Image: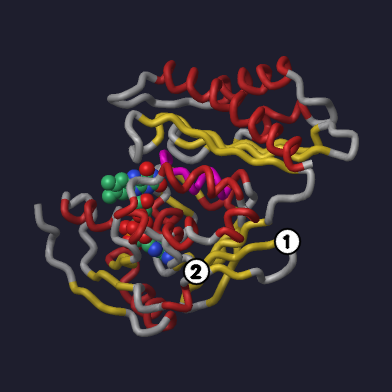
Amino acid sequence: MKPAPFKYVLASSLDHALALKAEHGDEARFLAGGQSLIPAMNFRLARPSVLIDINALTRLSGIDRPEAGQVRVGALTRYRALERDGEFLRSCPLFADALPHIAHPQVRNRGTIGGNLSHADPASELPALAIAMQARMRIRSAAGERTVAASDFFAGLLTTDLASDEMLVDITYPVLAPRSGACFMEIARRRGDFAIAGVAAVVTLDEERRCASVRLALCGVGETPVDAGAAALPMIGSRLTGDAVEAVAAGVRDLIAPSGNVHASPDYQRHVAGVLVQRAIRTAHQRISHAA
Ligand SMILES: Cc1cc2nc3c(=O)[nH]c(=O)nc-3n(C[C@H](O)[C@H](O)[C@H](O)COP(=O)(O)OP(=O)(O)OC[C@H]3O[C@@H](n4cnc5c(N)ncnc54)[C@H](O)[C@@H]3O)c2cc1C
């Protein structure tokens, strides 16, 4: 199908883009990589009357370090740029695991991190990473700026905290702390498909090699990415044992409420999520041991 008629505007500056969004509100959509929006328009699931192309706003693209221990990624940064930045992948190793699972190289050449997070597909990898890494999202409108924690950004199915006049401009991630290991794993029907279930885990040990923190987030098993950190709280202060990891997996299986899809029943998704939680925590832990 072809999209419903729309007006196309190439934004010449951030202020221009934000002024257009303030004027047209929900009738307008930003066009970033177009890898979710254009298919949705072609199927007429999305019918914006104004398309605000932000691809000329090069200052929205790139990776920098605003202060020690933090990495900031511009919303228009493409997956491909992240995949090719070794320093970024060493600072934020969950991305090294997760990016190859996103679609195919052609999609990764165009898709942007800001488009991904704003689209808020619950099966998508990067929203789960943002929650597990405790990222912060900087949001702008013509009226001003605010910052939101990733855990408060994803409001529902394909829905975020963004108001109709707002744009996500960048995302700040803490770099992996000392004595920490991270792992993302997912199961999908085919390489490049959206996940049936996926798990991001970040494990940090104290000086006695007991668990100081375990952060967990899942994709594909609910209407939003799921923050499952609470299920790992019993591990804090103790050594990471097989029994403890199995108990966390059981807690996650109880916590999630997958709805199932044509490829997987809710029970299967719950089972897969539990298996992945155990593998991701163990792998994250092994990666600390190997780095130490
Ligand atoms: C074949 C195929 C397979 C795919 N598989 C996967 C997968 O496995 N995992 C996965 O995560 N994704 C997958 N995707 C989706 C892909 O990752 C998209 O790139 C991503 O969801 C959207 O990013 P985009 O830059 O293309 O955004 P667009 O499609 O341009 O925009 C998406 C939405 O976000 C809004 N938007 C864009 N940028 C901003 C911003 N800065 N601020 C506010 N709103 C904004 C747009 O208005 C639109 O509503 C797949 C896509 C295809 C075509």
Location of residue 67 in the rendering, given as x and y in whole percent from the top left corner: 72, 69
Q: Which residue is mark 2?
A: 169
Q: Can residue 266 be seen in this snapshot?
A: yes
Q: How many marks?
A: 2
- The residue positioned 43% from the left and 34% from the top of the image is 220
> Residue type at mark 2?
Val
Query: What residue occupies the far left of the structure in this picture?
Result: 1
Q: Which mark is residue 69?
A: 1
Location of residue 170 in the rendering, given as x and y in whole percent from the top left corner: 53, 66
Q: CA distance from mark 1 to mark 2?
A: 20 Å
**Secondary structure of the residue carrying numbered label 2:** strand
| Along the viewing direction, whichever of 192 and 246 lies nearer the viewer | 192
Is residue 172 in the magenta section? no
Place residue 80 in its image quadrant: bottom left
Magenta segment:
122-130
Decide if ligand 1 comes within 8 Å of the CB at mark 2.
yes
